[in-house]
Image: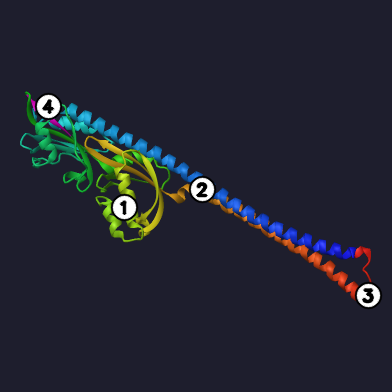
Amino acid sequence: MVKGVLNILFKTSNNIFLLFGILMICVATVIYLLLGKGASDALIQQMVNRQKSVARAGASLYKLFISDLSHQTSSYSNHSRIIAFDPKEVPVEFKGFMDGWNGTPVSGLILVDRQGIVRFGADRIGPTGEGIDVSEREYFNWAKTAKEGEVFIVEPFQSKIGFTTGRYVVSAVSPVFKNGQFNGALVTGFIIDEAISYYLDPLKVTNNTRVYLIDQNGVIVAGPIKKLIGVNYLDYLNKAGFAGGAVLVQKIKAVLMDTDEGSIDIALPDENKNGALTRYLIAYSPIVVGSQRMTLAVATPATDALESLTPFYFRDLGLAGLAAVGFLIIAVRISKIGGYKEGAIQEHKIHSGSTPPETLS
């Protein structure tokens, strides 16, 4: 009877051992998954924080650049050679201006007379724009009523002059006065996408980080995807026709209306992947210059944030898997040993018809 009780206890202990082991594997798996999620969430947040810093710095640098250009535009508009429209000296002044901004996004400048005709122009290549009528442009009408030294920042527009034709530019305009009377306007300009690259490329979080400048209507005026330049991104998403498009549009609208910096975690079409939806971590910062309002957005694929975690995740998962397999092998082995002992006991009973010797217990 004692041996029978011991056998029952032995089998019970084996079962308990096996069940306990399986339970421990399940608990360890849950803990591992939770820890993995915690680590991925931490990496995502770290990436978002870095992108916020980039967006904030980019917006500040962009506004500082416009401020510097505006100041120099106002200063040049008061130069005696500019005021006199001297045909020999104005080109010299223009060359000095372009040399001073060499290597920057500044693309050129023009001098417009009081009738709105471009009298002198220069860009990186040489003279340009002479004879063009800009009398109907908003900035010229502004200049006619502006005070000396004031500067008007023109909203981004696609250029139709010189080597910048077709590209989005921003202009700074200052009136030219002679003897206290309006005598024309000095207009300087820079290429927006070059300004973004100039200041933000060195700050990119990863090689896949994309930087966009979007106006308040949703039109992309600068970015790495050429097919999207000049496109209203809100309309683009509406026409894409994928599930959840309306929700994305509302989220983008909220970003464009936000007066403070922020971030969103969102899936958007990736034009480099045939429009496949890709999860992006986006930080943004508003840029307000005068009456203009734009949004600088810094977008990085979420996979880039988790890239450093992936090797460790699979390594640890492999080790956990090997440990689980090893435990199961041991459990099965112990179970077999118990089965062998029980079989030996039964065989001994059959052949001897007596209680097995003490050594078999």
Q: Tell me which amino acid carries mark 1.
A: Val
Question: Magenta segment: does it hold 310?
Answer: no
Closer to the camera, 325 or 33? 33
Whole-angstrom CA distance, mark 2 to mark 3, is 66 Å
Q: Quadrant of residue 53?
A: top left
Name the residue carrying label 2. 40
| SS type, badge 2 | helix
Name the residue carrying label 1. 249
CB under 8 Å between discs 2 and 3:
no
Name the residue carrying label 4. 81
Closer to the camera, 244 or 57? 244
Whole-angstrom CA distance, mark 1 to mark 4, is 51 Å
Q: Which mark is residue 353?
A: 3
The answer, for residue 209, to whether it is visible in the render is: no
CB under 8 Å between discs 1 and 2:
no
CB under 8 Å between discs 4 and 2:
no
| SS type, badge 3 | loop
Closer to the camera, 267 or 64? 267
Quarter containing the C terminus: bottom right
CB under 8 Å between discs 1 and 4:
no
Question: Magenta segment: does it hold 175?
Answer: yes
Whole-angstrom CA distance, mark 4 to mark 2, is 62 Å
Residue 309 as seen in the image, left or right of residue 53: right
Q: Quadrant of residue 358?
A: bottom right
Task: Give the magenta range.
Answer: 173-178
Q: Is residue 345 above or below residue 309?
A: below
Instruction: Tell which circle, 4 or 2, labels the residue nearer the N-terminal end.
Output: 2
Residue at 36% from the left image edge and 56% from the top image edge: 269
Q: Tell me which amino acid carries mark 2.
A: Ser
Residue 289, position in %: x, y? 25, 35
